[in-house]
Each structure stands twice: as structure tokens, then as C-alpha cells.
Image: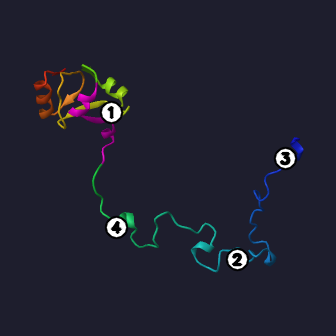
Amino acid sequence: MELNSIKPAAGAKHAKRRVGRGIGSGLGKTAGRGHKGQKSRSGGYHKVGFEGGQMPMQRRLPKRGFKSQSLKFNAEITLSALNALDQAEIDVLSLKQAGLVPALAQVVKVIKSGELTKAVKLTGIGATAGAKAAIEAAGGSLA
């Protein structure tokens, strides 16, 4: 194979549509734009969501709610997940390595869901009141 003999696959290339080049082209005179109206004019179009002057959908509907961007840095973990983890001392890094919290997580909190049967020492991790009581009842601690 030589560089001068390379060709694209059959049917891969096709001629560009040449509008406004006479009757024979099939796209002469109005160049496929029809007669009159905003869309037939040069520079005549409208922005996305424009409804011809009617109040657009995105403005008719009420604004609702708010989603904080800081939420993606928060994570929660259950007592049963802590119980399944084979570690006595747990911190945020060990939870990330175990895949129990996302890599972006900065603030981790233990919630009271499931049961904890072994003593665990948590460092740099928060807990709800119920979860804290359950951890301390199992002989663990929060630091």
C-alpha cells in the first residue's frame, strides 16, 4: 500500500449540499428555506426555549428547591457496615480504601442503622446521638 493509493471507504464521503445554485440542483431559488417567515431570513432564528413571545416554559414554572454543592463532600455510614469492617481503629481514609464512602467525601457520619457487636475506635468521624450510644454500648469510642 502506498500513500497515493489510499482512499476512504465507498460511501463514506459525499458531496456537500450546494444550496442556491439554480433549479437543476433541486435547492435553487429559496435554497430549501421555503417562502417568507423568520426562518427564511438571513440571521433569522431564535434562542433555545423561545416560544414566539409566549411566556416560555422555563419561566412559567415556579422555582423550587435548592441543592447544595457541598453535599457531595458529605457521606454517611451505618453501624452494620462498621460491624462488617475488620478493623479496630477506623478513620475516613480507611473507609475510603474499603470503598464504603466515596473518594470525594470529607465529612463522614455514622447513623444508627443495623447493629454493632464489636468495639471500634473512630477518629475524625461524627455520629448521631443514637449511633454514639450504640458504639459506646459495644465498648467502642469516638475521638
What residue is at 74 percent from the left and 69 percent from the top?
A: 19
Residue 102, relative to residue 26: is it above or below? Answer: above
Q: Is residue 101 left or right of residue 138?
A: right
Label 1 to label 4, Cα distance in Å?
Answer: 40 Å
Residue 20 in percent (x, y) is at 75, 72
Q: Dot 3 surroundings within 10 Å: few (below 14), some, or many (20 or more)?
A: few
Label 2 to label 4, Cα distance in Å?
Answer: 37 Å
Residue 75 in percent (x, y) is at 29, 35
Q: Which residue, given by chain and number where applicable, does mark 3 sit on? A: 6
Instruction: Using the image, tell me which numbered label, if any, was put on residue 30.
Output: 2
Amino acid type of the residue tagged 1 in the rendering = Val
Work out whether mark 3 precedes mark 4 in sequence or the reverse, and give the earlier one. Answer: 3
Per the image, label 1 sits on a secondary structure element best described as loop
Label 3 to label 4, Cα distance in Å?
Answer: 57 Å
Q: Which residue, given by chain and number where applicable, does mark 4 sit on? A: 60
- The stretch of residues the image draws in magenta is 67-85
Q: Is residue 46 left or right of residue 122?
A: right
Residue 121, relative to residue 23: is it above or below? Answer: above
Please state which of the two labelled residues, at mark 3 or mark 4, is closer to the viewer: 3
